[in-house]
Amino acid sequence: MAGTRLLVIDDEAGLRRFLQKELSARGMVVEAAGSAEEGLQKLGDAAFDVVLLDIKMPGMDGLAALREIRRFDPAPEVLMITGQGSVESAVEAMRAGAFHYLTKPFHLDELEVQVDKARERTALVRRAHAFERLLSGNDTKLVGDAAPMDRLRAIIRKVAPADTSVVIEGESGTGKELIARAIHSGSRRQSGPFVVVNCGALQESLLESELFGHEKGAFTGAVKTKEGLAEAAHGGTLFLDEVGEMSLGIQAKVLRFLESGDVRRVGSNRTQHVDVRVVSATNRRLADEVRAGRFREDLYYRLRVFAIEAPPLRERMTDIPLLVGHFLTSIRGVGQGPFMVDAEAMDAMKSYAWPGNVRELRNAVERMMLLAEGGRITVGDLPPEVSRAGEQSIPPGDEFSLARLERIMILKALRACSGRKREASDRLGISLRTLYNKLNEYRAADGESQLPMAPDSQLPPDAGTQ
């Protein structure tokens, strides 16, 4: 396949030159080494998709070299080359992890087919390796139909197909990584890896090693050569989370990488080119960080070709019923469902400011699922700060609104009666029909019709005619 990076390790100079010429003409990027030792050095300096390795060589033989190649993290697939009398050695190599073997003399068409198959295996392994490093959550669905979410989806649709660098700014818990995943899913790189680098979780030296990789022996604890996350993201998207937390020293190295596309592993003097799209996220205002001298201005403009603001939950409160319903069905293995939320609990959730945004709401829903009796979520299952918000939910200037006071009285009566509507209507001195009509008015106004409610919270077929 065109673009395949192939390393030929063979002590026959004529065969090396022939393969470099013919396979390069077929669109592959071919490098060659005349010994196992030289080949291992090249593998340490650059990433290859496939290695074509001769079994019989002076010095370190192919089997020993194969064992060393399998130590790379992740390792390229290896095709063994063997003579007619060395088939047993080839079988031994297959047991040691070789992808396949070819017997001399071989046809170029056969070789190309096997290289292509090996390249596909390498790509799958690298992609799996990259996804193991991802932060949790692979769902790119952006839940909500409030106006800020509609605007956000429209922006994502426009920017995703391009290779433009994007910075996502917003408070913690607003779903910045989810937005980045949505951009990746809508891009031409969607079949490639989406690799996350948490820039705020590691010290400068460790972050450099994580991002660019390192050579064996580059520092204490570097017991083997390791591919960096920038390499792992080749052909896909590199997500720099909390990019505002990077030190000025690592910022300079990231800038060089963004300008050239070249990475150099820690402890190496060789560079290699990678093809990635960079999407960044921060809960800081990068412009303020630039003015304060904590963030490089040149890096700021390199990253912030396009900016997206992640809306806080307080600006999209009408999405709370949808989000709660989404979490009730997506959180697995918690509590005894199916779950339903009563009106007072939902009213309290919509009265709370949610400073931790969607992340805090999700955690609250998981808590409610654990505490709910019989799958029914009441105000008593809410976190204390949320339930208190429900009790203090009269807005300033609305203290004398009869409609508001009526709603509060009805919801308090329902809580006192554990949701039993006939008993609540008796306490309030109103008919059951009136109570149902009022609750339906509240749900229509709040957009709760899509959220499962308590079993007796649905309007009976004849309630409107009683």
Image (spheres, rainbow, N blue to C red):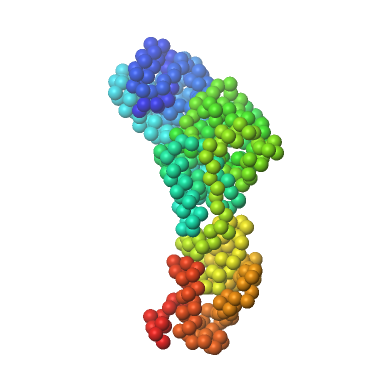
Residue at figure coordinates x 29%, y 20% from the top left: 107
| Quadrant of res 162 | top left
For the N terminus, the image quarter is top left
Residue at figure coordinates x 56%, y 57% from the top left: 315
Tell me if I can see residue 146 in this picture: yes
For the C terminus, the image quarter is bottom left
Up-down relation of residue 458 to residue 331 (above or below): below
- Which residue sits furthest right? 292
Up-down relation of residue 200 to residue 25 (above or below): below
x and y, in percent, of residue 231 in the image: 51, 32
x and y, in percent, of residue 440 in the image: 46, 75
| Quadrant of res 280 | top right
x and y, in percent, of residue 346 in the image: 54, 69
Indicate left or right for 129 with 220 as reference.
left
- Which residue sits furthest top? 14
Q: Nearer the viewer, residue 152 or 389?
A: 152
Indicate left or right for 448 with 1 as reference.
right
Residue at figure coordinates x 46%, y 46% from the top left: 156
x and y, in percent, of residue 93 in the image: 41, 28
Tell me if I can see residue 223 in this picture: no
Residue at figure coordinates x 58%, y 21% from the top left: 269
